[in-house]
Amino acid sequence: MVSKIKHIILTYLVLLFAQTSQAQTVVADSLMVVLRNNNHNERTKTLILNKLSSALIKNAPQQAFEYNKQAIALAQKIEDDYQLSEAYQNLAEIYSVFGDYEKGLKYALAGLNIAEKKQYDTLVVKALNRVSTFNFFLSENDSTYRKKVFEYRFKALFLAEKIRAKELLIAIFLNIGDLHRYQKSYDSALIYTDKAFLLAQRYDDIGSKGLALLNKGQAKVEQGKYFEALPFLSNAYKYLMGVDNKFDAAFALQLTGIVHREKYRYEQSFRFLNDALALSQALGSKADIAETYRQLYLTSDKVGKLSQAFEYYKKYHVYNDSIFNDSKSRQIAGMQSVHDAESKDKEIELLKKNEQMREENLKQQKFLIAFLSSSFVLSGLIALLLYRNNRNKQRINQLLATQNKEILSQQEEINAQKENIGLQNIELEKKNEALSFLNEEKNHLIGIVAHDLRNPLSQIKGLVGVLQMSEEEVPKEEKEEYIRLIKNAIDRMASMINKTLDVNAIDSKRVNFVKEKHDISAILDTVANDFEKAAKTKNIQIIRQIDPKIIVPNVDKNYLTQIFENLISNSIKYSPSDTKVFLKTYKNGNFATIEVRDEGQGISEDDMGRMFGKFQQLSAKPTKGEKSIGLGLSIVKKYVEAMGGKVWCESELGKGANFIVEFRL
């Protein structure tokens, strides 16, 4: 029974942190290809090593250990605490496969401490769940670990509820319910299993619904409530097969066969147990094959088919022995890998120390040889000079003067080289600073785009799932509405990507302006017409005070249009309903001036200083839940200045904002 609990807990962990073995193999192969490409910075390489180690844990733990070792070393070198915490968690799982739960707990706690210190909430939840699991494994032989199982599990539950991590919450509810069931606290077990089912139902998580029903059915079987167990097991099988989770679907069939045996329905018991056996054999799951043979033996024995029972019993022992041998072989191979790695590290450290001592001895020998050689040469020179001093004094003085000139000349060359090297170092430092800035901006850009594309992508994924249903489940009219919602989500993603590409194109000077004369009043009036519909949804009036035919030279029509679109869009987005937006153009001496003024929230002094920067999220928020990635005003400023104009803002908090653009006539 304890081994079955381990099996289910590990199943939940696999659902949380991994995919199927086949999928993991594909992922590992892909990551190895990516890793072989050396064009990665150290931070990216650490991420790849962690993902590769995680993908290999189940099927190739020795390889996983080697990649994990590299990930830990690199994360420590670049001081990447997030990846270091992930690497420690992976190492804990590797030791779990090796059967060394004490070392597994040690590294799970190390990863948890880092995640808690840095407040990586999602990592903390996963680490707490894993620490609880290791305490459960260790509690079999030491009861002091037992009270920590629920302590860490409930900490994970509290934090998962706080950060609203629904996938983690479902798995934690299932784990807690299963632990209560193991302690035969069936009422408590069913409470948490029902919580998991309701949460899975709310988010239409079919796989988790199947697991919750499977747990309820297992609890009913253990209580001897066989008739109550059957509908739970039947629906669990349907849900699990619906998401291709054949591993747990086979267990549902096995439990169903047990129920029919206990209710004296032997023919049905054989049928369900044979179905479970076929499914487990297709998966190659030796543990489930062995258990199913044991149940077939018990059913055959109960109906008096002793010969058949004996055959099933022999097959059960063959598979059970094979599982034991495989487990021990894997543990021995894993621990041998660990021992080899540790021995190799010690050997490398010893070789380094020997190499350092050898280099130090060589330095001392070279110094002694140089000293003796110099002393010998110097002594010879002194003797020669003393011997020839009286006769060759003038000649020696001339020779010394020549040598001094050469030395001075060489010194001047050295000084010039030093100055040149100094200038090169300054230039290199400037380039390094520029590269660091570009790298940080690239990371920031990736973070912004990944964050803001996640929601529309999730929406599209959910809607596509609905569209795959039959017309009996979802009417055609509803599907058309879902298609419209998908198109809107795609349009939002395209807008985000276009804005991001626009601002980066300006920064890299890749924008080709078509400089011509244009009527800015006509362009502003056209853009205003395009926003009338958006304004009406919030009952906002667009008041136009536009002087006709203000012709401005050396401007690009497309980029003027984008400038006006961003300013008018922001005015509508940040204005409450039932207000006005004022558009104004006029000549001011040798300048053409455009004003876009609203009656919205206004802009604080702090925001005024950074409002035209990239990716700036200001304190003012859209009034109707509209989205903003903080690029619009940055694009406006760069386009205006690229066309020789100026843009600024006049605003008081709570009294609206007036954006002013000025071009020379």
Image: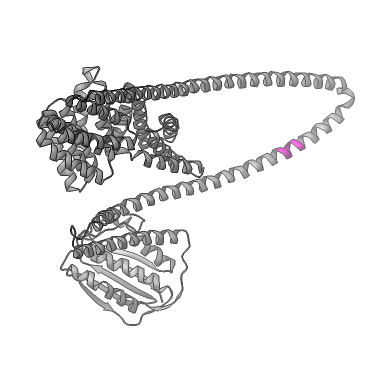
57 or 76, which lies in front?
A: 57
Q: Quadrant of the C terminus?
A: bottom left
Q: Is residue 323 left or right of residue 185?
A: right
Res. 351 in view: yes
Residue 599 place in picture, x, y as percent: 20, 66
512 or 345, which lies in front?
A: 345
Q: Residue furthest right?
A: 391
Q: Is 387 above or below relative to 153?
A: above
Q: Quadrant of the N terminus?
A: top left
Report the coloring of the rendering: one colour
Q: Is 40 above or below relative to 538?
A: above
The residue located at (41%, 47%) in the rendering is: 440
600 or 398, which lies in front?
A: 600
Q: Quadrant of residue 264?
A: top left
The residue located at (87%, 30%) in the rendering is: 395
Q: Residue furthest bottom?
A: 548
Residue 507 place in picture, x, y as percent: 44, 59
The residue located at (18%, 34%) in the rendering is: 267
Q: Quadrant of residue 516?
A: bottom left
Residue 111 place in picture, x, y as percent: 33, 31
Residue 407 colored in magenta in the image:
yes
325 or 625, which lies in front?
A: 325
Highlighted magenta segment, given as a residue range: 406-410
Res. 164 in view: no
Q: Quadrant of residue 572?
A: bottom left
Q: Is 443 above or below relative to 549?
A: above
